Image: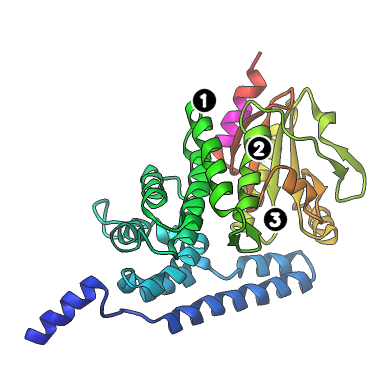
Amino acid sequence: MKYLSIIAVLLMTGWVEAGTAQVATQIRQEYERAVRGWEMRLQTAVGEEARRSVVRDRPDPDEFGRRMWTEVKGALRVEWSLDYTPWLLETAPGVMLDRQGGALKRSPFQEIMREVELMHLKSPKVGRICIAMAAYREPAALTLLEKIEKGNPDKKVKGQAAIAQAILLRHIGEGRDVMIKRRDAVRRAITNAADVKVGAITVGDLAMNEAYIVKHLIPSRVGPSLVGRDISGLPLDLKSFHGKVVVLAFWSVNGHDAQKTIDLLTKLHKKALGRPVELLGVSRNPDSVLRQLKADGVLPWRNFADGDGKLSDAYRVRQTPKVYVLDKKGVIRFIGVPGSFVELAVDDLVTEK
């Protein structure tokens, strides 16, 4: 009994690890291989039914996220866990926000924040977690990011915490004071960590991106112009739809919840018929795939072809689906995902004087 008590204490303090970095690495590699294999199957699928089948068979990030969480949750106080928690936060948000056991139980995301504050506030590895936390629209995350920036001695971590604050403020607040905070955070990020890598880009790139969003992509700004061609090769210009409410939907055949997105957009298209509303899709999928879907009756709405990603980049779309609703003058009035809030925004703008 004496030794069991000691082991229990060690587990609580992180000295006995519930999982290992080796197994965590295996889980991450398995997921990456599964996604690559799925993408190959999607590219080679012939026929609409075959493509639908492959889309439905997309590797479930939550499945891998649950496995990863099982591996790292008992080791959150050990530094090796910091190499895997960013992956968890970015790959499996559904798992991270799940509160199994009721409202009083902390979610995995809250557990990670708690352990970072208790054990890793001054770690040089915590910067990457800061940026991963920015996608979670929780005020508590903003408070933690401010503590990390203030308390961590590493300038590069301070810069990553600053850019994470700028990104998070975009999601959870508006108004002049928020804009000032975002601007100041962007400046601190550039000063302290412009050259720090975040995947294939840098903190400096993220900072410039935030500055662009503030200037062009917040509600009340005129949406950037889009000029290109549709998936049939015909010219398509966003400005030609001034006078109508435009739903600009960025989506992908191989995106998360692709079938649900297609169903919601189809419903929105049907509701727009006979009204001063235009649904325009923007997709980076191959034109051949989109043309076949249109021929099969799956895509009744018109779509910009965006194989090179330039149109998506103009609206800074990194993940799909994402929807911008523009009023009759081309001003951005709503930003979100397909669903009832988009429909409500459209209904309000159609009747707006």
Q: Position of residue 52 (x, y in %)?
A: 68, 64
Q: In the rendered image, is residue 246 in sight?
A: yes
- Secondary element type, mark 2: strand
Q: Badges 2 and 3: C-beta atoms under 8 Å apart? A: no
User: Between residues 139 and 159, which one lies in front from this camera angle?
Assistant: 159
Q: Is residue 68 above or below residue 175?
A: below
Residue furthest toward the top?
353
Between 169 and 71, the one lying in front of the other is: 169
Q: Amino acid at mark 3?
A: Ser
- Residue at figure coordinates x 81%, y 34% from the top left: 238
Dividing the picture into quadrants, the one containing residue 216 is: top right
Where are the magenta residues, as a range?
A: 341-347
How far apart are the two marked residues, 1 and 3, measured between alpha carbons?
A: 35 Å
Residue topped by disc 3: 252
Badge 2 is on which residue? 324
Q: Position of residue 339 (x, y in %)?
A: 57, 41
Whether residue 125 appears in magenta in the rendering, the answer is: no
Q: CA distance from mark 2 to mark 3?
A: 15 Å
Q: Is residue 1 visible?
A: no
Question: Which amino acid type is marked by label 2?
Answer: Tyr
Residue appearing at x 67%, y 39% in the figure: 212
Q: Identify the residue position indicated by label 1 in the image.
A: 176
